[in-house]
Amino acid sequence: MPPAPDLPVLAGGPPWPGDWSSFWPDMVIGCLTGIIIGLAFWLLDVWANQRHSRKTARRVSLRIVQPLLLILQRPTIAQSFTELGELPRKHRLALELIEDSDLDDWHEERPTELTEAVRDYRTRLRTLKADADDLEQAVDRWFTVHRTRPMIREWVEARLLGASDDFLRALIPDTEDYDTVEAEGEAVVGNRLVRKHARAYRQAERRADNAVKALMPILIANIRATSAR
């Protein structure tokens, strides 16, 4: 029998082709190792994201929930009827608090009934502020065209903001004829543009007040749940 031919030898290595018997086991082990390591990193990333979400939610919650509840629960001692383009004090303080927080980040990280309710309230307040600005501009236009006494504008603003008859009468000095002032003021209030924006403002104010009624029990429940932990 003729002798077997010599296998080619690579420089500095074993004969070629080498031993492939361990190739597939090594590949399987390598793949499994890669999958396990990848899964471990993925779980670590998920845990880090969840931890960040919890920290964000807690931070924003501390900045919003209890301070907002205190603002909304605070009784209104004396309502102002002299700031036509401004929100009522309670709504104004609430909007400043919410706008200065990271509410959207909180909602994006951990959306809840609470974040939805606060965002809805914020939307109502922004609409109310826009309608207040529109109403003020409509009144400004009227008084730019019709030059009248300053007390007429004061009466009109108080009237549009819902002042009582007693309050309106107290605005006018005894030396003035109240019926004359009232007639001049009602001419402004009855203007088509003023009436349109006044109606929109009152509707927006009702929606904001309704949003508060829906939000209050959610705030209280959140504070109680947090305190019980």
Image (cartoon, rainbow, N blue to C red):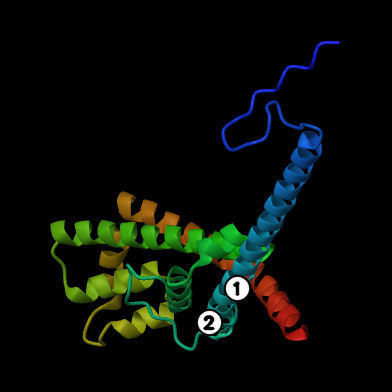
Residue 106 shows in this picture: yes
Asked whether, in this view, residue 170 is left or right of residue 111, the answer is left
Q: Please, is residue 127 above or below residue 78 in the view? A: above
Marks 1/2 in contact by CB < 8 Å: the verdict is: no
- Most foreground residue, 111 or 182: 111
Tell me which residue sits at (19%, 62%) in the image: 143
Q: Please, is residue 25 above or below residue 153 in the view? A: above
Within-10-Å neighbours for mark 1: few <14, some 14–19, many 20+: some
Give the alpha-carbon distance from disc 1 to disc 2, as whole Å: 24 Å
Q: Which mark is residue 7?
A: none
Question: Mark 2: which secondary structure?
Answer: helix
Task: Tell which tag, 1 or 2, sits nearer the viewer.
Answer: 1
Within-10-Å neighbours for mark 2: few <14, some 14–19, many 20+: some
Amino acid type at mark 1: Lys
Q: Please, is residue 151 above or below residue 138 in the view? A: below
| Residue at numbered disc 1 | 55
- Most foreground residue, 34 or 96: 34
Q: Position of residue 144 (x, y in %)?
A: 15, 60
| Residue at numbered disc 2 | 71
Residue 189 shows in this picture: no
Locate residue 179: give its quadrant.
Answer: bottom left
Question: Mark 1: which secondary structure?
Answer: helix
Residue that protrudes farthest toward the top in the picture: 1
Asked whether, in this view, residue 165 is left or right of residue 63, the answer is left
- Most foreground residue, 122 or 131: 122
Q: Position of residue 220 (x, y in %)?
A: 69, 78
Q: Position of residue 203 (x, y in %)?
A: 50, 57
Tell me which residue sits at (25%, 86%) in the image: 173
